[in-house]
Amino acid sequence: MGREARCEATFGDSGGAVKAHLDTGVVRVRGAFRLDAAFADIRNLAVRGDALHFTTRGEGVTLVLGAGEAAKWLESIRRPKTLLEKLGIEAGMRVCVRAVDDATLIGDLSARLGDTPVTALRGRFDAILAQFDAPADLRQLDALREHLEPDGMLWLIAPKSSCVLSRCVVQHERDPLPR
């Protein structure tokens, strides 16, 4: 989700300066105290004045974020974005998936698009999601890019244990692919 703030905060009897971060499904707080509050465990969520208030694990939490920012945090906690929303995938888009080994993602894409996503690189796409498992997979980048609309999105998926994408970024910075 990406929201982050340096602010004053309290958690039970502890309080002080903290860095608070909205992560996927959790509020993380570091500084005067440590707290990881899963959205599912948050109760009594409210904005009062310039602060976000909630309870978790039976303890009260206050993050003094400013009224506007507190309202945004409240909305993000109440209605977290789905992965497809974060990726910018919308109904009506032409989407291609290449070697994606994630049944949940494919199911979510099918529901959003109203049909099973295309797997063959024929025509142009608004978005291509490609799974890269080995450095050799990077050779596909040019072919994938050729099938993107001018304002299309290319999302590369790699196993967490893989360094494939970091190698891709280093290669791109050293020798950018021409458009």
Image: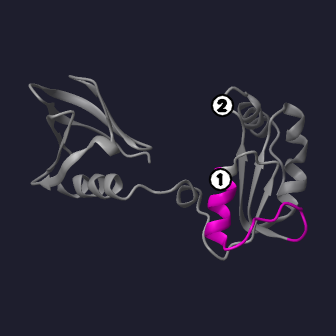
Residue 134 in sight in this render: yes
Residue 66 in sight in this render: no
Image coordinates for residue 42, horizontal then vertical, percent: 26, 44
The answer to whether 137 appears left or right of 128 in the picture is right
Residue under numbered circle 2: 160
Q: Point out the frontmost of discs 2 and 1.
A: 1
> Disc 2 versus disc 1: distance between alpha carbons?
16 Å
Q: Which color mode does the image show?
A: one colour
Residue under numbered circle 1: 105
Image coordinates for residue 41, horizontal then vertical, percent: 29, 41
Nearest the viewer among 110 and 92 is 110
Magenta stretch bounds: 104-123
Please check the rendered image and state whether residue 172 is part of the magenta-colored stretch, yes or no. Answer: no
Image coordinates for residue 90, horizontal then vertical, percent: 60, 70
Residue under the point 74% across and 32% down: 170
Q: Residues within 10 Å of mark 2 (few under 14, many from 20)?
A: few
Amino acid type at circle 2 is Lys
Q: Residues within 10 Å of mark 1 (few under 14, many from 20)?
A: few
Amino acid type at circle 1 is Leu
Residue under the point 89% across and 47% down: 140
Describe the element under mark 1 as helix, strand or loop.
Answer: helix
Would you identify the image quadrant in which residue 121 lies?
bottom right
Q: Which mark is residue 137?
A: none
Describe the element under mark 2 as helix, strand or loop.
Answer: loop
Nearest the viewer among 175 and 30 is 30
Residue under the point 33% across and 52% down: 77
Would you identify the image quadrant in which residue 79 lies?
bottom left
